[in-house]
Amino acid sequence: MGKHNLMPLLSSADQYSGALEQVDLIRLRANTVIDSDKRSQLGQFFTPSGISLFMASLFSSIKGDVKLLDPGCGPCSLSAAFVDESIKRGELKSIEINAFDIEEALTPFIRESLDICEELLSLSNIDSTSKYHKKDFILDRAKSGIGKNSKKYTHSILNPPYKKIRVDSDHRRALMTAGIEAVNLYSGFLSLTIKQLAQSGELVAIVPRSFCNGPYYEDLRNQILNETSIEHIHLFDSRTNAFSNDKVLQENVIIHLVKGKDQGQVTITSSPNADFFLDSETNSVSAEDLTKRTVNFESVVFPNDQQKFFHIAANTRDQNLVDRLSIFTSTLDDLGIQVSTGPVVDFRAREELRDNLVEQSVPLLYPAHLKYKVTWPIEKKSNAINVSKKTLPTLWKNKGHFIVVRRLSSKEEHRRIVATYYNGSLPGELIGFDNKLNVFHIDKVGMNKHLALGLYCFLNCKLLDDYYRLFGGHTQVNASDLRNFHFPNKELLLKIGRRRNIENRTLEEIDKIIDEEISQMTGESSSPLPAQKKVEGALKVLDMLGMPRAQQNERSALTLLALLNLSPEGSWKQLQNPLIGVTPIMDWCRNVYGKNYAPNSRETFRRFTLHQFVEGGIALYNPDQPDRPVNSPKACYQISPDLIKVLQKYNTEKWEGALESWLSKRGTLTKKYAMERKMEMIPLTLDDGTKIKLSPGAHSQLIRDIVEEFGPRFAPGSEVIYIGDTETKEGFFRKERLMELGVKVNRKGKLPDVVLYWPERDWILLVESVTSHGPVDGIRHGQLSELFKDANPGLVYVTAFPDRKIMAKYVSEVSWETEVWVADAPTHLIHFNGVRFLGPYD
């Protein structure tokens, strides 16, 4: 390691906290060596650095002598993150790392990663040993790792493989000898790891969410509940985001368990993405739009639930939904009803399919025939199946009343559960159901009409559909999922089914009926449906107003509702337009809609929702004081007075006309609102006489100082290529000149705040202001290196601070081999590391 010029300013932990950063580069190399198809077959996906960082931060205690287990370690990203976290906390005396993996091609990467961990631990005066076990974790530890004299680990961090295991496999037999029943590798890894933890030992794992419900994982859930305390569960809003680089379509959770601890409250966090980062203000790991809540354990596992399902609600609105449905406790067995996948597999009986009903054939129902009602026959689809020796076992009696649920829903449909009532009225004594359907029946015969209609209403209510989207873990609806539901009892289903004309009620009317029945049973009228409908309405409005896709999300929808002060029970006809700041908007989201965003989400609200609202003419910025600095704590927003009159017509016959009129004028309105601020802009004259204006505030003043003070002192005669603006990023850009220097940039948002070119030295200086993106840290250094990789001149990286007080706050994050300039001491330049002062390294 090179000399660090600022070593006295940094603690030992800050100096050597780079294990994960180095190992993540090894992970990327390993990804290119291990065949992606092979990893997919094993269900093994390497853990991205952000997730590793977050997982390591969840451990309650890392001190004294630690024995760490990392089963299925891959390139050891999780172990590296644990080492970084241990060094950061400063309470570790010694550590023994035990890494298991069977992939031969990973061996050199694992050894390299463990060497890095040991070196950094040594530099922090922590005794360490690392052991790489090139063994099958389950086969090795199930036989030798759970006895009384076996090694017990104080900590385990794991991202196990997901592959299913056969009943006759070695893994299944080995787990059974250890008293573990598992249907796939991840549940086997998790169960075996719990057994190997010492008392008070901690485990943090990222695993599929599927273990939270269903009969296959009942043993694992009971083991977790009997042997550990659930401390923390993290949810991802999207099933594609945890392992997006590997294109994994799997709904994952991160869970933190402590062995032998009495169960207390559970912390539940959620984030749309896996973009975790270390927040410099709180010194904690966070993510964009991170939400956090603490709940009683009884809200996660209901005391009267014999199956011990885990109900993980990310916010109070979701919790209200769970609580609302918990009044229903009947199973299908209690009701005497079965649900089965349709028995007709059409590709196995192609020669038996018929376009129309002919002699020796019976009706055949496909998903295309069903959408709440049966439409049969239809064109361009088989409508019948021949009765033969081959097909007869797959056909049922066409008698009684069936409820049929499609396993797959189309993208255009707003509901995932779409149930259709079929009354047995099609011709013939037999009927065929395609295997892309789930059929509710009683011993392969239809049921009582009123019971079927009551079931039809319950399955089509929005409460159940929202519940399934939250906790189902699948995009399709399988028979096993439907069996796991709890239903109203038979008396209530019959009562609902006897309602007048019930089969012709709209979905909204069905929602109202179910909600009324729940209110009568509980004595509580609070329903999550009005809140959900308001959010969905706000999303539709944003789409109609022409907001980009990135702003069509729940954060932006709630922001719009806050700007209108529109509560779940409020009316679009009675909107308000308060002056409201970013933090009050976030407080409003929590207090009114139950969405508790982490405090460090303020910048996300400002930069990725409110900024676009102002640009699009939806909201005004500081209408009470246009010259207020951009970064003022008193900054506020207000819905455009022209728009509020339009929004008051939403859901009325006048809406479309009012919207069309507003959209036609929006460009003029946006220009009008921008003019009010233009008068308060900070003027800046460049060395060639070009005059530009920057937004008011400290950030723009610092940019002006960079151009007028830093440039002439340390790069005299340099050309200004680009100047960013706090609000618009449109300040000044000599794109053609940058292209002459070998750099082609399509998105200005990735550029630093100021780009200078110094012809005398043939250097490009990339200057970042802390008030915009933070310092040039390791991540930003990598981003800029990639963006300017084709540049002909050398690259110099500079972080500019307005004063030394702010510099001290961020100094530990500044990347080595960069420069730091402070505006209140403009004649000085601070150099971080390296062999030269102010110059490129490539």
Image (cartoon, rainbow, N blue to C red):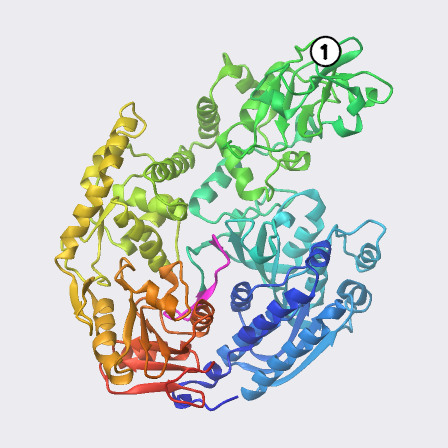
Total marks placed = 1
Q: Is residue 271 left or right of residue 102?
A: left
490 and 82: which is toward the camera: 82
| Viewer-side residue, 665 vs 158 | 665
Q: Which residue is mark 1?
A: 357
Callout 1 amino acid: Leu
Label 1: state its secondary structure.
loop
Q: Please give the name of the residue rendered at 37% of the width and 68% of the height, measured from the top-left corner.
A: 740
Side (left or right) of 415 relative to 443: left
Outermost residue to the front: 740
Q: Nearer the viewer, residue 714 or 313?
A: 714
The answer to which quarter of the image holds residue 515 is top left
Q: Where residue 338 sits in the image (x, y, percent)?
A: 70, 27
Residues rendered magenta in the picture: 270-285
Image position of 678 with respect to 767: above or below: above
Q: Position of residue 749 (x, y in %)?
A: 36, 60
Q: Is residue 303 above or below residue 78?
A: above
Query: Which sits in the foreground, 713 or 571?
Result: 713
Magenta span contains residue 280:
yes
* 377 left or right of 504 in image: right
Question: Is residue 516 shown to the viewer in this render?
Answer: yes
Question: Mark 1, residues whose alpha carbon is within 10 Å: few (<14), some, or many (≥20)?
Answer: some
Is residue 480 depicted above or below 452 in this figure? below
**In the image, what residue occupies the spot 75% across and 13% down?**
362
Which of the 4 image quarters holds residue 711? Answer: bottom left
Looking at the image, residue 59 sits to the left or right of residue 111; the answer is left
Q: Quadrant of residue 157?
A: bottom right
Instruction: Please indicate, yes or no, whether residue 594 appears anywhere in the rendered image.
Output: no
Q: Position of residue 840 (x, y in %)?
A: 42, 82
Expressed as whole percent of the image width and height from the top left, the position of residue 103 reads 74, 67
Residue at 16% over, 46% down: 672
Q: Is 277 colored magenta in this rendering?
A: yes
